[in-house]
Image (cartoon, helix red, strand yellow):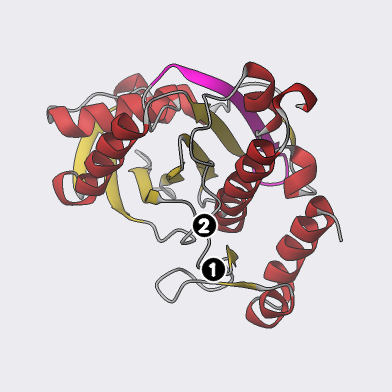
């Protein structure tokens, strides 16, 4: 079974039979995560970069990106920034740490920029968008950023922000369990709610944020949309990202 076939099967099983199917494929969900969240099985040998390996080439970085084929239907290559991006994420708040978070989300740079390679995928059925990037930062710099992300749920658990058109966002941040892959990782669940002025249903933007370091390499993603975030895609992208980097590192540089 190829990597692409495995992931497509995983996402389908998650939607239908969750735990039983995941166990069949060698996947399981962490006890603190929401049900039907796929993660890679734990092993003692983590797929880190081999000792003495150098920075990824541009070709290697591109080869390490996940694709719409990896995630399977209904994911497709993006047609552009989601309409909710400017309306909900281009916002300001009085708290410096929380403003930093909003700025990073709007720029799709949880690990800081600039990125080495970037891709974006859309789910046209739900309007969700997943933006995935590899960073070229040194491992020590990545670890410092991961340490900061870990403090965000405490510093910005709930705050208000002013968005486009004088909309007021009620923002909540919590820790998001991620597959225990790579060498260091941090996940966040961010929700931003705007109450309807006419008493109707509120508008809710939900984002999954994940950042992972594996050896000398690191990647991050922001996945979400209005009403809910496709968490199964987040979890699958994390495990795929680590596997893809491991595969790229094993190949001779001239062949990538």
Q: Is residue 41 above or below residue 11?
A: below
Q: Residues within 10 Å of mark 2 (few under 14, many from 20)?
A: some
Residue 167 seen in the figure? no
Camera-side residue: 54 or 56? 54
Within-10-Å neighbours for mark 1: few <14, some 14–19, many 20+: few
Residue visible at 45% across and 35% down in the picture: 216
Can residue 19 be seen in the rendering of this structure? yes
40 versus 119 height, above or below:
below
Of residues 166 and 205, the one drawn nearer to the viewer in this rendering? 205
Q: Residue furthest right?
A: 1
Q: Is residue 154 magenta?
A: no
1 and 2 marks in contact (CB < 8 Å) = yes
Q: Secondary structure at mark 2?
A: loop
Instruction: Please state, as top left, top right, bottom left or bottom right, where the N terminus lies in the image.
Output: bottom right
Residue 97, compared with residue 55, is above or below; it is: below
Image coordinates of residue 234 in percent, x first then y, are 55, 51
What label does residue 183 carry, if any?
none
The percent position of residue 135, horizontal first and vertical second, equals: 47, 26
Q: Which contiguous range is marked in magenta?
A: 113-128
- Is residue 92 found left or right of 233 in the rendered image? left
Q: Which mark is residue 46?
A: 2
Residue 177 place in picture, x, y as percent = 41, 61
Answer with the quarter of the image where residue 28 lies.
bottom right
Q: Residue furthest bottom?
A: 20
- The residues bearing labels 1 and 2 have C-alpha atoms spaced at a distance of 7 Å
Q: What is the secondary structure assignment of the residue under circle 1?
A: loop
| Residue located beneath label 1 in the image | 43
Above or below, 113 against 125 in this view is above
Q: Quadrant of the C terminus?
A: top right
Residue closer to the observer: 141 or 172? 141
Residue at (75, 39) in percent of width and height: 68
Magenta portion: prevailing SS class:
strand
């Amino acid at each position: 079974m190829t990597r692409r076939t495995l992931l497509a099967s995983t996402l389908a099983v998650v939607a239908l039979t969750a735990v039983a199917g995941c166990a069949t494929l060698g996947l399981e969900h962490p006890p603190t995560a929401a049900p039907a969240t796929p993660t890679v099985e734990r092993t003692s040998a983590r797929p880190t970069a081999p000792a003495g390996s150098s920075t990824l080439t541009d070709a290697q970085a591109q080869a390490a990106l996940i694709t719409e084929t990896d995630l399977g239907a209904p994911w497709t290559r993006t047609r552009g920034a989601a309409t909710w991006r400017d309306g909900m994420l281009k916002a300001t708040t009085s708290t410096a740490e929380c403003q930093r978070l909003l700025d990073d989300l709007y720029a799709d740079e949880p690990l800081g920029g600039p990125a080495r390679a970037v891709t974006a995928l859309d789910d046209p059925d739900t309007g969700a968008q997943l933006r995935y990037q590899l960073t070229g930062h040194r491992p020590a710099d990545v670890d410092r950023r991961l340490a900061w992300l870990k403090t965000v749920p405490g510093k910005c658990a709930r705050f208000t922000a002013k968005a486009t058109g004088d909309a007021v966002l009620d923002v909540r941040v919590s820790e998001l369990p991620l597959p225990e892959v790579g060498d260091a990782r941090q996940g966040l669940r961010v929700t931003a709610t705007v109450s309807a002025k006419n008493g109707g249903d509120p508008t809710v933007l939900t984002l999954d944020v994940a950042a992972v370091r594996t050896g000398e390499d690191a990647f991050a993603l922001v996945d979400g949309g209005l009403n809910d975030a496709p968490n199964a895609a987040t979890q699958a992208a994390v495990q795929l990202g680590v596997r893809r980097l491991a595969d790229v590192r094993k190949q001779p540089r001239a062949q990538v």
